Image: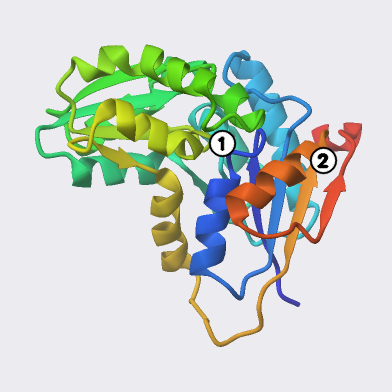
Amino acid sequence: MKRPIGIFDSGVGGLTVFKAIRAAFPEEDLLYFGDTARVPYGPKSHNTIIEYSIQNARFLLQKGIKILIVACNTSAAVSLDELCHLTNIPIIGVITPGAEEAVRSTRNKRIGVIGTEGTVRSEAYTRAISKLMPDAVVFSKACPLFVPLVEEGWTDHPVAKAVVHEYLHELQQMDIDTLVLGCTHYPLLRDLISQVMGNQVTLVDSAEAITAYLKALLPVNIVGKTGKDIFYVSDNEDKFEQIAKRILDKEIAQLRRVRLFESWFE
């Protein structure tokens, strides 16, 4: 029996990762869990983020997944080590692929990172980039309002434009040539971010980098049967479906709301 790939995020942002994986692996079955009842994760404490991440992982592990993709930068930055204690299956976070792509992209070794408060506070990207390129200079900026804007579907709203400009104004002065979109929600604001930062700054989307990691683990079989897509959320399935249609450019056939059971803790 074919086992699926499991993907989780705090909300809709991880759908950017889902979309990239689906494009690269059309034959694989994909399960996606969006913790829409508890989004955003960024402002929460490390202990709470770890608890939520473990619960999300256990839910997907109960579905018999063969690989777990932590498509939430905040979860990956804070809880990846804890998650690795849960299972022997491969677990892929978004931090390392994003850092590696940033190092490949930069020319002047001045790299910006934007993310949630939790991701920036963890300094996970700074450590990962510095390990790969010790002489790199990393400038980090928390952009906590980006996730609510995306979850609301306001990716091209005048308010979003004003917020993006406000957050990125400092980074414009830092002579960076590469900017890591350190939250899987942020690629949905890519056009606005690019307008503010200019074409001379390369935007790094870790969703694309993750597919390279998967290709090292899985054979690509484009001739096989098309895989199934199953989506789970913890709340607001109607809003999730609306936003998912825009991100994935297709109807969502199987979407289920699940309860946060105590058994997920055990």
Q: Residue shown at 82%/58% (left/top)?
A: 254
Find disc 1 in the rendering and name its residue: 72
Q: Residue shown at 48%/32% (left/top)?
A: 183
The percent position of residue 121, horizontal first and vertical second, equals 44, 15
Closer-to-camera residue (199/156): 156
Q: Is residue 194 toward the left or the right of residue 17 in the image?
A: left
Q: Residue shown at 30%/14% (left/top)?
A: 169
Quarter of the rendering containing residue 206: top left
Q: Is residue 181 positioned above or below 252 on the image? A: above
Quarter of the rendering containing residue 8: top right
Q: Is residue 82 toward the left or the right of residue 110 in the image?
A: right
The percent position of residue 39, horizontal first and vertical second, equals 69, 25
Name the amino acid, label 2: Glu
Name the amino acid, label 1: Cys
Find disc 2 in the rendering and name its residue: 237
Tally of numbered tags: 2
Quarter of the rendering containing residue 148: top right
